[in-house]
Image (spheres, rainbow, N blue to C red):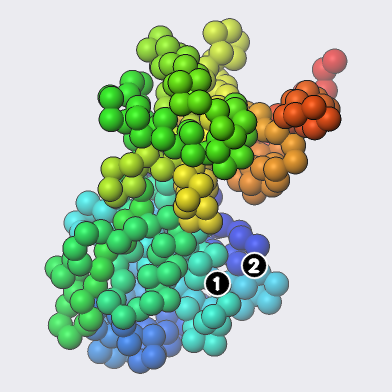
Amino acid sequence: MEVGPREISTNRLTLRPPVASDRGLWVRLSLDPALWAHATRPMPASEAHASAEFDACLDRWRTTGFDLGVVEESLRGRTVGFGGVRQADAGERLRLTFCFDSAVHGRGLAREAARAWSAYAFEWLPDLPLVAVVGEHNVAAARTARSVGMEAEDTPDASTGDGDASRPTVFAAPRVEVLDRFDGQTRESVLDLWCAVNDDGGAVGFLPGASRSAVAQALSAHEEQMADGSAAAVLLRATGGSVVGIGFWVAEANPMLAHTRTGYRIMTDPARRGRNLGRLLLAAMHRTARAHGVELVSVGVRSGLGITRFYERAGYDEVGRVPGAIRVAPGDDRDDIVLSRRLDGRPMVADGRA
């Protein structure tokens, strides 16, 4: 299994694998009763038990290449917690877990870290369901789970509890599907999503108020590409079955461009804005492209919507811009911007040949 960068940086945090010198923090947090008030399993019985759990974490890093890691405040270089994604349930699921020092609660650090960990899992870790298991009264953890794109499953998963721990609820991330054709129900769900994004002002080929038939015609063009093997659709499907995100990778006919793909119609449910879905969708698209040997991907965006910042945070660089190429309305011309990212770890550097 290919595992990505071992260290992740966010606006305020550095998320890294643990080292031996982190044992003290792990033990201290593991034995803080205040952090176990809503836990889904009992607190370790002693320092020895907590230390043994730390050793097990180090072993999992050595054998699988991922597990819980350390959270540092980047500017201060201070360790403030542990968390990450580990295998659970005999390897059948991935579980998002986090534990932060009480002194930093209320600052949104868990949300910031959890959003980064979940996107990392979608791009790099085994293709398994991603869940978070939350104690029934742990309002803050439930809020964090929702902020990373998860939804509560229909029934609490009592089997993940233990002893006197509170009854847990399982929050599940959307599932990724890579399709070369749509069944009827999926096609209607994609149309619902596309129309909702149009009407919300999203830059996905139409202006607000576009008819469903016009959108369906554009979707048919993508389906023709899917049928001839030049395109694939990457979907995010919510626990209830609806499509909450979609993007298309399209290959060029030129064999000299076989190592590249261009992304089209990358969109997520506007009713779930701020829930990390765009980040999860793009991460899933990167995983899909990389699995097909793609080295370089590009997207085109419209200026004036702040979309470039989203892609830049995901590692893209602006590589081209045509001023005023998109006419949204009379007197409202926008730039057509191309952003690219390498998926093979190499930097975006021109070869210098004119």
Instruction: Check disc 1 and give the amino acid type.
Output: Leu
Residue pictured at 29% horizontal, 49% vertical: 239
Query: Within the image, what quadrant is residue 78 found in?
Result: bottom right
Residue 6 visible from this viewpoint: no
Q: Position of residue 88 (x, y in %)?
A: 25, 60
- Confirm or deny contact between disc 2 and disc 1 (CB under 8 A): yes
Residue 268 visible from this viewpoint: yes
Quickly name the residue at label 1: 109
Structural distance between the alpha carbons of marks 2 and 1 = 8 Å
Residue pictured at 47% horizontal, 17% vertical: 217
Query: How busy is the neighbourhood of tag 1: few (under 14 within 10 Å), some, or many (20 plus)?
Result: many
Q: Position of residue 349 (x, y in %)?
A: 74, 31
Q: Position of residue 231 (x, y in %)?
A: 46, 19
Viewer-closest of 136 and 317: 136
Q: Position of residue 230 (x, y in %)?
A: 46, 14
Above or below 46: residue 283? above
Quickly name the residue at label 2: 12
